Amino acid sequence: MIPSTIDLINCEQEPIHILGHIQSYGYLIAIEPDTYSVVHASDNIVDLVGTDAAQLLGQSIDKVLVGTHLPISTLTEILNVGQRNDSWETMNPHRLILNGKVWNLIVHQHKGLVILEWEPIGNDQNQLINQQLISQALTEVQSSRTLDELLQNTARRVKTIIGFDRVMVYQFGDDWHGQVVAEEKEDDLEPFLGLHYPASDIPKQARELYKVNLVRLIADAGSVPSPILSKPGWPASQPLDLTHSVLRAVSPVHIEYLKNMGVQASMSMSLLYRGELWGLISCHNRTPHFVDYQARQAAKFVSQLLSAALEFRKDKEDLTNLQQYQQTGRELHQQLLLNDDVVRALTKLPITALDITGATGAALIFNNKIHQLGKTPDDKQIRALADWMGTTGTESFLQTNQLPVLYPPAEAFRAVGAGLLSIVLSRELNEYLFWFKPERVEQVTWAGNPDKPVTVNEEGQRRLSPRKSFAAWTEIVRNTSEPWSEAELSVVVKLREDILQIVTRQANEIRLLNQ
Ligand code: BLA
């Protein structure tokens, strides 16, 4: 059997934006914008226009348009405006009546081709309700007092808009594993709130795609996707890029994952913080469930509101911490300027080096002596740590919230020092300032054993499927402290400059005196 680590790498290599299929509730055609010649068409297009895809390929779009009741003048107008302002999204959707049924046409241009996608439409009443829900969501976001309340309110709003059985807010950790941090669900479903899922459940290329395309719907995990055909002579090496498509059929591996979870329809919206993926709003339904374009946009809007609110809250929190640490840092600098004795200024006066971060212990090694503040490892352990620091390269500082992983002897003092932030004062003289954070023993409840995320499928061959069991799996996470924040890092780096400046000035003064 192939080792599971390789399987997970394979997983990351699946090119999910060019898998060559769309979900069969909709139809797709891609044309060249200058000639209007059809380059790609979904195999099921015959159901929409009455002509086989094979007959349309390489032809001008006119032939297709006859069937779709979309006048060529309208299409030209759409393309002109869209190309002029690159404003495809604001113009979408375009409404068409076809065979007595109303359709949404969604148009965008990508990599030199114009992609037209038709999908069914919900009723107008829903749209009115969605407008109301959006404005309610706005009020709620503004009035949520705590983060939990904000996340919970968002989940509830999204559930009302799209009507799924379960709506979760899923937050990524530093290592890309994730946790369900809010949930709104039908009563008869078991709760997923608080459960953790391994990073491999949402592989890297999927996360990258979700930063660009913020919503995806899998309306029916059991339906057979429709293949996309290309015009004769079109190079197989240039499959249609579905990065921005609304109908993209998702990875078969993920479809199997959903089936294993008992889910028939899934929808997710991206939550971004400063352009990076903070999390997803992930929604499940036990039966197939189509959500039309307008409702998806409404849900996307609510998730963007949440993204903005998260960003605002986090920025505010970061700023308060930074200002507080900076203020203490300035006071410490004053002490340094007023005192000849660096050790005294950093460890013996009202403000100490310990006060400029959230650390619970600090140690200064200077002039071959150790000075401790708060809870720290013992002298021998600090000396050994300093010796190890001397071997770690040339950086002027080091930070980790998992010291025992980098430096195994730290396991012995992880209760006080699982996290280390260190600045180098002089490698030659073995002089350092260390800050320590204690181990944060955390009980993580995984949804299924995270070490076994894949199993070989029933035929026992190469195609691998996600694990079959989602039974909760509890693990104790050791050797890890709270992470160091950017505010802590910046203040500590500034302190290093202050100390070095003073030490250099003092050395120069001594030199001058001795001359
Ligand atoms: C995609 N995996 C996804 C998506 C989610 C999850 C939300 C986005 C697509 C969607 O909206 O359904 C995972 N869904 C979750 C998690 C929860 C949830 C964690 O509701 C928690 C409550 N998946 C695996 C393994 C592989 C894998 C082992 O578990 C690979 C071997 C792959 N997941 C995988 C791929 C995608 C994916 C390839 C991209 C699907 C696509 O967009 O084409």
Image: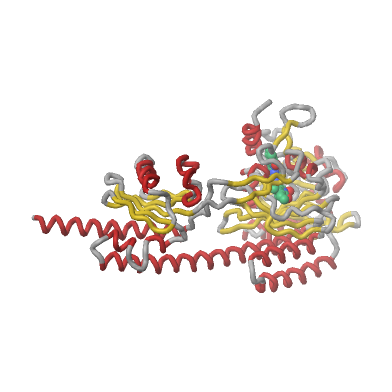
Query: As displayed, is residue 144 above or below residue 484?
Result: below
Please, which residue is most extreme toward the left here? 515
Count of all numbered marks drawn on residues in the image: 0
Residue beneath the point at 65% across and 32% down: 4
Towards the viewer: 177 or 121: 177
Residue beneath the point at 53% across and 48% down: 480
- Quadrant position of the C terminus in the picture: bottom left
- Residue 382: give x, y in percent of width and height: 38, 47
Colour scheme of the picture: secondary structure
Please, which residue is most extreme toward the top here? 1
Q: Is residue 501 left or right of residue 277?
A: left
- Residue 345: give x, y in percent of width and height: 30, 63
Residue beneath the point at 65% across and 38% down: 451
Q: Can the viewer see residue 9?
A: yes
- When asked about the image quadrant of residue 295, the answer is bottom right
Towards the viewer: 112 or 505: 505
Towards the viewer: 394 or 449: 449
Query: As displayed, is residue 41 above or below residue 363?
Result: above
Q: Is residue 339 left or right of residue 273?
A: left
- Residue 137: give x, y in percent of width and height: 72, 69
Q: Can the viewer see residue 116?
A: no
Residue beneath the point at 37% across and 48% down: 379
- Residue 365: give x, y in percent of width and height: 32, 51
User: Within the displayed image, which quadrant is ligand 1 positioned in?
Assistant: top right
- Quadrant position of the N terminus in the picture: top right
